[in-house]
Structures are given as C-alpha cells and as structure tokens.
Image (spheres, grey):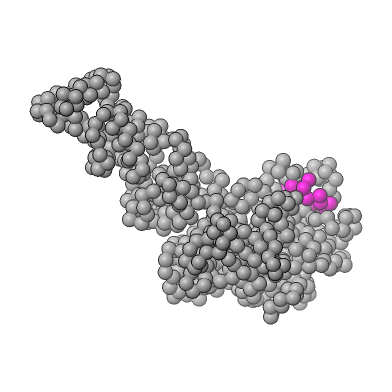
Amino acid sequence: MAFIQADCELDVLERFELFAEQQPRRIALKDHSGEITYAELNVAADRIARTIGEQASDSEAPVVVFAEDDRMRCVGLLGAWKAGRAYVPIDPSFPEAVVAAMLDNLDCGVLLTDGAGMTASWAANRGLRVLRVDEQFDVPGRAERATPIGDALAWIIHTSGSTGRLKGVMQSYRNARHYVRTVIEGLRIQSEDRVATASPLTMHAGVVYTLAALASGAGLCLIAPLKQASEAIVRQLVEEQITVLFTVPTVFRRLAPLMAEHGGLPALRLLRLSGETVTPRDLQLYRQSVGPQCVLSIGLGTTETGGITHAHIDRTTHIEGPHIPVGYPVEGVEVRLIDERGHEVAAGLPGEIVVIGRYLSPGYLGLPELTNSLFSVADSGQRIYRTGDVGRRRSDGSFEHIGRKDLQVQVAGRRVEMAAVESVVSGAQHVREAAVAAYSDSSGDVRLVAYVVADPNSPTTSSELRRELRELLPDYMIPSRFIFVDSLPLTPTGKIDRQALAEPNREKKSVAAKYVAPRSPLEKKLTQIWEEVFGLDRIGIHDNFFDLAGNSLMATQIISRAVEAFRVELRLPSLLEAPTVAQIARVIVEIQAKNTGEADLARLLDVLETLSEDEAQRLLADKGTRQT
C-alpha cells in the first residue's frame, strides 16, 4: 500500500469485513479462555452496531465498553465503529468512584459489558442503556454501517502517564487509520502472520495492534501477563507458532529465559518492544532468547501521538554507547528536541521530545487547560505536542530515548536520570530486573532506592551490587537502598507500576553485618549521627559506611557533625579508612590521646566505656585542652 498524504485511505472495517467474507472460518482472536472466527466476530459486531442504533438516540454519544475479557472488548470496539461511535474502554479494576466520575465526564448513552463487576441496575441508575457483549454471538442480522467522517472521534483512551492523574485522550478516525496503517506497513503485517500482543484493549497500543492484525487478515493471539504465568504464555506462543510478538520490555525480560528454553520460538520473525526504555540488557536478552531469523523492532510512541519513531535491529547490529536508539521518525511525523526555554538543542545534547504532525490527538476530554498546556498549532497548521520525554539525536540522525522529565531528580546537587541508573542496575550480574525510585529522607535530601529482582539461581546482596556499581556509576548515582523483591508490580499494560512500589521504611535492609548496639556513650553519639545522615532508625556499630550506600556528601556530613560534637580534628580520609562506628570511635579517641603514653591511652579507652556521654565529652575536651 502506498502512503497517501491526503487522507490515510485505509478503511480498517472494510478490510476486516473483506477477510470475514473470504475466510470466515479463520480464527480471528484467541486467548487462554477461547477463540473467535472472523465470521463470528463480524456477526457479533454487526449485532451490537444495530442494537446501538436502535437504542441510542444521540448519534454521537460514545460507547463505553466495561469488560474484563479482551475478546469482548474487541467485539465492542468493532461494534461501536460500525455504529459510527467512539469506543471508550474502562478497566473494571478501577475503583467504583473513579468509574462513576469517568462516566459522568463522558456523557455516554450505551454501556457494553460482559458482567465484570457491573450490574445492569447500577448502570441503569445513571441513565445508560446496557448491552451484554457476550450475548451477541450467532445472532442473525447485519448492521447498516455508518460512515464516520475523518474528524469524528474513534476512541477515548484513559491514561495516567507518570502523574497518576487519569485523563481521556481523544483520537479521530483519521488518526486511528493512520496509526493502523503505520503498523501494517512498518512491520509488514500479512494474512499469513500469527500475531501476539500483551497490550490490552484498554490501552492505545492494544487497540492499534489488534486492528492492524484484523485489517491484515492475520490470526491474533491475546496474552495477559497479569493473569497468565510466564510458562503458560511461552507455551501459548510456541503452540500458536507466533510470528510477530508485541510486548513491553518488562514482560519480555520475564519471558526471555523461557523462550530460549523453547528453542527461541523458531516461527518468530519479529519482536516488537515499546512502551518503556529498551536497555542494553534487553538487547542481550533478545540475542540470547530468539533465533537468528527474528528481527528486533523498537518503537517510541505515546497515546497522544501514536507511533513517533521506529528502528529495526538484528543480531549483527552494532550499537555504541549506553542507550539503544529508538530509530527515525515514522512517516508523517516530525520530531524536535527543545530545552527548558523552548529552543531547539544541537545534536548530541538532551532535550524534551516534541512531536509535530497532522495525526495528533485533539486533546484531553474535559481538560482544556491541560490540552492547551501540552498542545499547540504550528504555522503550517499541524499540531505540536510536548511529550515530557527526554531524548537525544545521534550523529546518524536517529534518536535515543533517555527517560521522562518527571523522572529526573537532583541528588547531591546533580541532575540524575533515574532511567539511566535503572538501566545499569538491571544489567548488573545476578539481577533479572530492577526499578529505581527517588524519595526524600527526613532532612529533605533525595535518595535513590533500587527495587531488585535477583536471579534465584545465583542470588546477590546489596554489598555485592554496590561493589559492581562503583565500577560503573559515580557515587551520587548509586542507590542508597536496595530492596529485594520477588517481582515488580505491573500495570495492566505490563509496564512497571512505579506508583505501586512500596515506599521504603527506615529499617536497615540487606546489610551483611549483624546488628551490634553501641557499647559506650561515644559510640551511641556517633550512631545517632549516622542514623540521622542515612535516614535510618537503627545502625549497628559494625555496619559498614559503604554497605549502607554512603557517598561523599554523607561522609562530609558525618565528619562535620563529629568534629562539632567531639571537638576533634577529624578529616574525611579517616572515615574512608575506618568505615564503621566502632572504628571511627577508636580513631577519635586516638586523635585526642595521640600525645599521651601507651598506658594513658589504654586507661582512657577503658574509662570511656563506663562514663556517661556528657562525662566522656568533658574528659575528651579536657584532654584536648591539656594537649594544646
């Protein structure tokens, strides 16, 4: 198909209906609970479209699909489109109050459900017509399909992004057709393909991938990472002889070892990773887990813009630097990088990714201020969208994705990209996957915390990780805490759910030394200083400064507070050479007693063990005065 700039003439429904007529018994959709042929799917969608037309008086009101099953969501999507309406999926896992607020904002007239947590009376009380999607199969009758114009709404997808605030992203039919066309042409989806996607139809990517498969006559396999075990998913991929796999890096990292055990999925020709930053570790897993016939496709995109860039990598591709390129802009899209003042940055410098094009979202439903803050119109009449993502243009013109602007933090006065730290931690030995978050301690200082899923066959410790990371990162970028977890929480799309990461408590974790309480007033005061600097509730006298993830800023704070508390001439190297409370306490005593005889020193050490804190400090002060 040739690219047509004028109006993106690919009609998804016409293509789907043609395949339903030509190959009615071909399986259109299949998941862990059942399957649907092209003919069955088309009949069910027709029935829904006809019923919507009969029961909904407002011809422009969107159709809400409230279903747990992606097969049912797909029927609802096609039925809504055939009726000329916008498809609005709502995840049943959302709290009831959130669902109610979304429905009030949508002003919809019809709700399609498979009975997932939603009763007919609950919806009827809100004035909604309720249809059971799962009752629409094998019902005769064909709808007279509406022909929506290009600017009519095709769907409204709710996303929280990295802010946690739900917002409905609107897309027109013209945009939807463009996104589907881009996937089909860019990835060469054909009727012979067996396509699998891990993105649910509540999300932009899941809708586009599903429509791309159905408009190509391909067989589509729906996988559910939150409902299926990894072993079951890989068996499904093998049994269905999947040729194209759409997923996010987090899910792929869990599947990769099992894929390798199954011979690298010999039928797989293309692995598409998008939705999260692809790391060098992911590239290594790709080369280890699939056969030489499989190409790795990397894409950058947003719900507001659809696909922005894509890149194809094979096993021989050589990539320099710590970032994997996300490729070149897709057709019909222009990408720019700007600084904080809105000026374009030069190649090689980081900047916010700005997208310019004809096929961008009209904005956010019911949020005009947010729409105006992120969208604008260029002199050419094309729309402009500020993504909030940070990227860099390479010397060959391709782009790198560095991370989110809102995932940049200031640590010890330096800007840190948490995605960069996360990439290094994830690539460490004996680490399967990792996530990095930032928290403020009691003093207001920002600390990085790494959540680590260790390899169960060769587990690691926080001390081992820190030793490895010191060779790869400056000390201010090394996480202050390592929290070992069995698995990372995921969103319904399979991405890391950063809002679900448990905020670390103030207890010391994963430090090799066994806790030993202070034995003297001197050690007690030093321990208090350490606990305040590290933001922990309990530190033992043998806990190592470096095992606690101490950095140069913390060392300076400990030394300065010790000098003030004990009135000694203590320098930074002292802590580096004596990195425990017990050791630095002895150094302090030795500094004060360095001009006394050996007998006096021994006596002083014995005395300090028995004195109160005030008495010990007075003795040290008197000792220092006599030396002066």
Q: Is residue 3 magenta?
A: no
Q: How many marks?
A: 0
Q: Quadrant of residue 239?
A: bottom right
Percent position of residue 381, x then y: 72, 67
The residue lying toward the viewer, choosing from 356 and 129, is 356
* Quarter of the image with the C terminus in it: top left
Q: Quadrant of residue 170?
A: bottom right
Outermost residue to the bottom: 2
> What's the magenta region?
102-117
Percent position of residue 95, x then y: 68, 42
Residue occupying image coordinates x 70% and y 54% = 371
Residue 79 in sight here: no
Does residue 586 lie above or below 273 as drawn?
A: above
* Quarter of the image with the N terminus in it: bottom right
Percent position of residue 100, x then y: 75, 43
Does residue 384 lie above or below 539 as drawn?
A: below
Q: Quadrant of residue 333?
A: bottom right
Residue occupying image coordinates x 80% and y 56% = 62
The residue lying toward the viewer, choosing from 263 and 461, is 461
Residue occupying image coordinates x 30% and y 40% = 544
